[in-house]
Image (cartoon, rainbow, N blue to C red):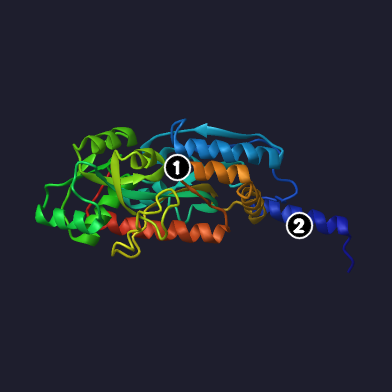
């Protein structure tokens, strides 16, 4: 029995429509504007990198890529909205380390970051740096640990808020070193940094982007980089591994997430587009100027990072009984 090409094509399309499978082809995508949801206010590092990449995506994809800021609950409001969006590649989320933290931190969460999203491609990462106030007679991790053990509970560490990555980094430090220090949460990086500089709080983990100028001018003293390798901007500062604490990594990272079920062709097109953008010398220079490292790579590599971060911070949150509404 012969079946015409026309009838066969119509049958395939009919099956796709009946099954609910989106008939999307890489050549057809995108055919309309893309909305890029950022769960943080304008002007911050997450917003800056999103707009930088979105502008180049718009040129490459020949469609508007509109950045929409939707802050609240450590990025969770935006995440919940994108989780419910159509899985067609026209609604993107800026995924960050907060998504991995929120998975165990928040009680009323209605999505699973490792099941309800596809991590498409990483934009950048930036290591945290363990710093102390210059008023503290400490120049190494060993000296800080010795002082903290000599005076349990007397030292304090600053964070950008309960449940933030600097908070969890401090708790991870306490677990790994067997020390007891007081957590002092602040509403943002600026006031936390100000009080460490002033000596009101003795230590804390700071993102390289926010604190690098203060490290370089001596206002605060960096004692270790929480990454596998030293920072070019701080060549004389050892890593936590070099200080005796292997596998101690605290990286701020971000990249594109899309809802689970987004067609593979669309995921591949977004991934290849951003990988090309991240090879642009101008973009590389801008990211390095933010004390960051360019990302890139495959969706599988990004997924592995997200899953490992979710497991790591979940363990820290459970061991320290940290909860947040």
Q: Tell me: residue 47, above or below residue 106.
A: above
Badge 2: few (under 14), some or many (20 or more) residues near its Cα, within 10 Å? Answer: few
Which quadrant is home to the C terminus?
A: top left
Residue 29, horizontal then vertical, whole percent:
70, 45
Q: Residue furthest bottom?
A: 1
Decide if residue 251 is on the left or right side of residue 151: right
Q: Which mark is residue 80?
A: 1
Q: Nearer the viewer, mark 2 or mark 1?
A: 1
Query: At x 66% / y 34%, what residue is drawn?
Result: 64
Residue 166, horizontal then vertical, whole percent:
31, 46
Element class at badge 2: helix
Q: Which residue is mark 2?
A: 12
Residue 178, horizontal then vertical, whole percent:
18, 60
Q: Earlier in the sequence, mark 2 or mark 1?
A: 2
Decide if residue 94 is on the left or right side of residue 21: left
Query: At x 66% / y 38%, what residue is drawn?
Result: 58
Query: At x 46% / y 58%, what residue is drawn?
Result: 305
Judging depth in this view, the residue of 43 and 219 nearest the camera is 219
Quadrant of the rendered image containing residue 9: bottom right
Q: Is residue 107 visible?
A: no
Q: Which mark is residue 36?
A: none
């Amino acid at each position: 029995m012969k079946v015409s090409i026309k009838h066969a094509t119509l049958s395939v399309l009919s099956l796709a429509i009946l099954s609910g499978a989106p008939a999307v082809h890489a050549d057809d995508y995108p055919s309309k504007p893309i909305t890029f949801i950022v769960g943080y206010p304008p002007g911050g590092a997450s917003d800056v990198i999103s707009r930088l990449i979105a502008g180049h995506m718009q040129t490459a994809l020949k469609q508007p890529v509109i950045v929409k800021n939707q802050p609240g609950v450590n990025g969770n409001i935006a995440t919940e909205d994108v989780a419910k969006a159509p899985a067609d590649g026209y609604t993107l989320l800026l995924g960050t380390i907060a998504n991995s933290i929120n998975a165990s931190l928040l009680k009323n969460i209605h999505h699973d970051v490792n099941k309800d999203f596809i991590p498409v491609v990483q934009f950048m990462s930036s290591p945290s740096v363990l710093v102390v106030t210059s008023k503290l007679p400490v120049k190494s991790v060993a000296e800080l640990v010795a002082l903290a053990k000599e005076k349990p509970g007397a030292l304090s560490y600053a964070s950008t808020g309960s449940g933030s990555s600097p908070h969890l980094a401090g708790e991870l430090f306490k677990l790994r070193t067997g020390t007891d220090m007081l957590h002092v949460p602040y509403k943002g990086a600026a006031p936390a940094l100000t009080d460490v500089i002033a000596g009101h709080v003795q230590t804390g983990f700071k993102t390289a982007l926010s604190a690098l100028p203060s490290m370089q001018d001596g206002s605060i003293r960096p004692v270790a980089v929480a990454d596998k390798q030293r920072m070019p901007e701080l060549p004389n500062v050892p890593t936590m591994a070099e200080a005796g604490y292997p596998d101690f990594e605290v990286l701020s990272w971000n990249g594109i997430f899309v809802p689970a079920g987004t067609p593979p062709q669309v995921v591949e097109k977004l991934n290849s587009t951003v990988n090309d953008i991240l090879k642009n010398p101008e973009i590389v220079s801008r990211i390095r100027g933010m004390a960051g490292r360019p990302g890139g790579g495959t969706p599988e590599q990004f997924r592995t990072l997200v899953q490992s971060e979710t497991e790591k911070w979940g363990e820290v949150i459970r061991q320290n009984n940290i909860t947040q509404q």
